[in-house]
Image: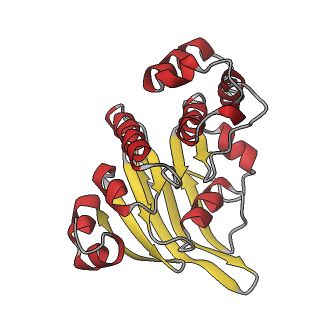
Amino acid sequence: MAKNEVLRVENLSVCYGVVKALRNINLVVNKGEIVALIGANGAGKTTLLEAILGICPIETGKVLYIGQDITRLSTEKRVASGICLIPEGRGVLSMMTVLENLLLGAYHIPSNIDENLERVFQWFPVLKDRIKQMGGTLSGGERQMLSIARGLMSNPNLMMLDEPSLGLSPVLVEELFQIINELKISGHTILLSEQNARKALQCAHRAYAFEKGDVVLSGSAHALAKNPKVRQAYLGGVV
């Protein structure tokens, strides 16, 4: 792995029975980058994130993280090493308060909790106002903010966001991507799976386009946004 690489996926394939969910995927995420995975629902984006975290078994290939082969490591060890997944569907624990959800995110790194709380409250001031509120009573946008904030509580080396804008109103989508851009400016390393290709390509450094388990295009986000095939398939013919 190159010195600045956080993640390298090599020839990774995943099968669900006889169905090939991913075919020989190769992907790199460098430190401080946002790398977007674009494609329709069912294209394999979520499966890749789950394979990286060890949630679903791989058939062939490797997952290298900060120079180490973690292909056979347990999910718990991968999380403890600094990989964080914010799953589709938010994942907020509804019967716990906002504060309890945030503290759960710091489970693997109990030091610097106050400092981390202050930082996430700067990014998500609405959560500070809701600190004693039960997670299940938050709006959809607030739950998404809480999920991301909980992930940030672990000071991850690699944050993976799975369809963060799903189900949000256009106004909340704008707010969400503003936060993602702030994380970009602050140097966070993010692997972003997102059906909203336009917004994903606007904030990403590089991108991979998925189709039925294959990477069909890859390159700089700017180049993909200008690519006629991407524009036709994902951007409605316009940028």
Q: Residue 98's quadrant in the figure? A: top right
216 to the left or right of 223? right
202 to the left or right of 169? left
Q: How many marks?
A: 0
Residue at horizontal 56 percent and vertical 71 percent from the top = 44
Task: Using the image, determine if residue 49 lies above or below residue 143.
Answer: below
Taking the view exactly as shown, the residue that stands out farthest to the bottom is: 18
Residue at horizontal 40 percent and vertical 54 percent from the top = 35
Residue 222 rendering spot, x and y as whole percentages: 23, 60
Taking the view exactly as shown, the residue that stands out farthest to the top is: 114
- Quick one: 88 or 134, which is closer to the camera? 134
Residue 111 rendering spot, x and y as whole percentages: 64, 16
Residue at horizontal 27 percent and vertical 73 percent from the top = 231
Residue 216 rendering spot, x and y as whole percentages: 40, 78
Task: Using the image, determine if residue 196 lies above or below residue 101.
Answer: below
- Quick one: 143 or 208, which is closer to the camera? 143
Q: Residue 60's quadrant in the figure? A: bottom right
Residue at horizontal 44 percent and vertical 26 percent from the top = 123
- Quick one: 94 or 206, which is closer to the camera? 94
Applied colour scheme: secondary structure
- On-image quarter of the C terminus: bottom left
Residue 16 rendering spot, x and y as whole percentages: 72, 78
- Quick one: 10 or 86, which is closer to the camera? 86
- On-image quarter of the N terminus: bottom left
Task: Using the image, determine if residue 220 lies above or below residue 173.
Answer: below
